[in-house]
Structure formats: C-alpha cells, structure tokens
Image: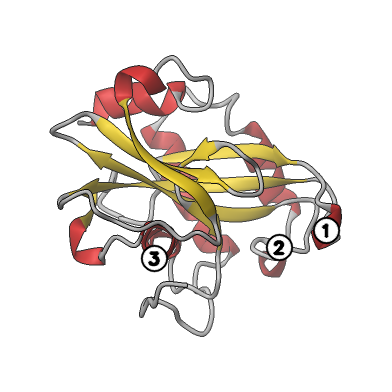
Amino acid sequence: MYSVVLRQNFLMTGKAEVAALFDVYKQQFTDEQDRIKIFCEYLERTEGGRLYDRKNFDGHITTSAFIIDIARAEMLLLRHKSLGRWLQPGGHTEGDDTLLASALREAIEETGIAPAYLINMPVHINTDVPFDIDSHYIPPNPKKDEAGHYHHDLRYIFAYSGVRDNNYNEEEATGMSWVSFASLAADDTFRNVVAKLALTL
C-alpha cells in the first residue's frame, strides 16, 4: 500500500456538515432530483455515526476521484479487482479529516500518483462540495461476509499534470488505462459525468 500522510484520527465531516454540503450540491445541480433521491432518503434516516460504517448494510458513504487530463480529454480508470469493472479510484473513508481528503487519498493509494500532480477542481467556494453524487448497489460478498448494500459515492475532480508512468496498486486493481471522454460518453456508467464535465471545463 502506498504511504499517504493525509490520514487523521477521525472523520470530521458529521451528518450536519454532510447535509450542508448536500444542500449546496442540490443548488449547483438543480436537474438531479431523481438521481439523488436515494441518497437524500438515506441521509434523512441515518444517524451520523453510521454514515461511513462499512458494516452498515443499509448503505454507507464512500468517496472517489475523477482524474482527468484536460489537454487530452481523457480520464484515468482502474479495472476494479473484486467487481471486474473499469472504474475511477475510490473506496471507503478511513478516518480522513474531510471527504475531499478521502477522495485524494484513494486516488494516491490506488494509482501511485504523487499529490503534487493532482489538482482539485472545486465546483463551489466550499471545496468539500462534490462534483457528483452517485448511489449504486454493491452485490453481496460472501468471502467478506458482506450483505448487498448501497454505496453513496461522493466524487471529486482532480486535474492531472505529469508523465504517464504510474504504477497502480495491484491489491486493488488489475489494470489502469486513460480513456477518452468520447468513449466514456457512450458508457452508461460515465455518460452523466462526461456531460457534467463538458459544462465545467
């Protein structure tokens, strides 16, 4: 595992803070009521201490990072080891001090990219407001004794500047690839993200 110095003793983003970020997000992206309905209902019924608990099989908050090369109009994806799908780096929070720090840590750990080459691209003056929120179902994993549940993924954008000689974390992924926005626009998983990027960049 890559060494990262972003980890703190506890996640400071409590339920009230998450709700405040979510309010700003809804104001930024007013046409996403249907997409965020599941997360909205989850946030209303879940106590603060359970929001990030990976053993909460009603669901829990995760974070991820869209790493993009603006000049080449490409996004960096990893072939997820357990799901067998090409996805952005991300995962469970692990005591990070903010949600943004959690997404950055996941990006560094899974791609090997040094933080100096990842520039956060905030959508609001409050940099912890995510670029995207996606609630998706994770199937049961008997090996980990985990029931099926939802990941409520808060996603952030990072612009990449550097050479492409990074070594991905083989504990988490089986491959890494830069994929064009044009290709991602035809993919159900990333179509909405690419459309939002077109309005942001």
Mark 3–mark 2 contact, CB under 8 Å?
Answer: no
- Density class for disc 3 (Cα within 10 Å; few <14, some 14-19, many ≥20) is many
Q: Nearer the viewer, residue 146 or 95?
A: 146
At 39% across and 18% down in the image, what residue appears?
185
Disc number at residue 143? 1
State which mark lies toward you, 3 or 1. Answer: 1
Looking at the picture, how far across and down is residue 178, in whole percent?
32, 36
The quarter holding residue 107 reads bottom left
Secondary structure beneath label 3? helix
Q: Which mark is residue 101?
A: 3
Q: Mark 2 or mark 1, which is nearer the start of the sequence?
A: 2
The residue lying at 41 percent from left, 29 percent from top is 193
Label 2 packing within 10 angstroms: few (<14), some (14-19), many (20+): some
Please identify the quarter of the rendering in which residue 146 is found.
bottom right
Residue 155 vertical position relative to residue 75 in the rendered view, above or below: below
Q: Is residue 197 above or below residue 172?
A: above
Reading the image, the residue beneath label 2 is: 54
- Describe the element under mark 2 as helix, strand or loop: loop
Question: 55 or 107: nearer the eye?
Answer: 107
Label annotation for residue 39? none
Tell me the amino acid under the disc marked 2. Arg
Residue 161 can be seen, yes or no: yes
Of 16 and 77, nearer the camera is 77
Asked whether residue 121 appears in the rendered view, the answer is no
Graded by Cα atoms within 10 Å as few (under 14), some (14 to 19) or many (20 or more), the crowding at tag 1 reads: few
Q: Position of residue 157 (x, y in %)?
A: 32, 45
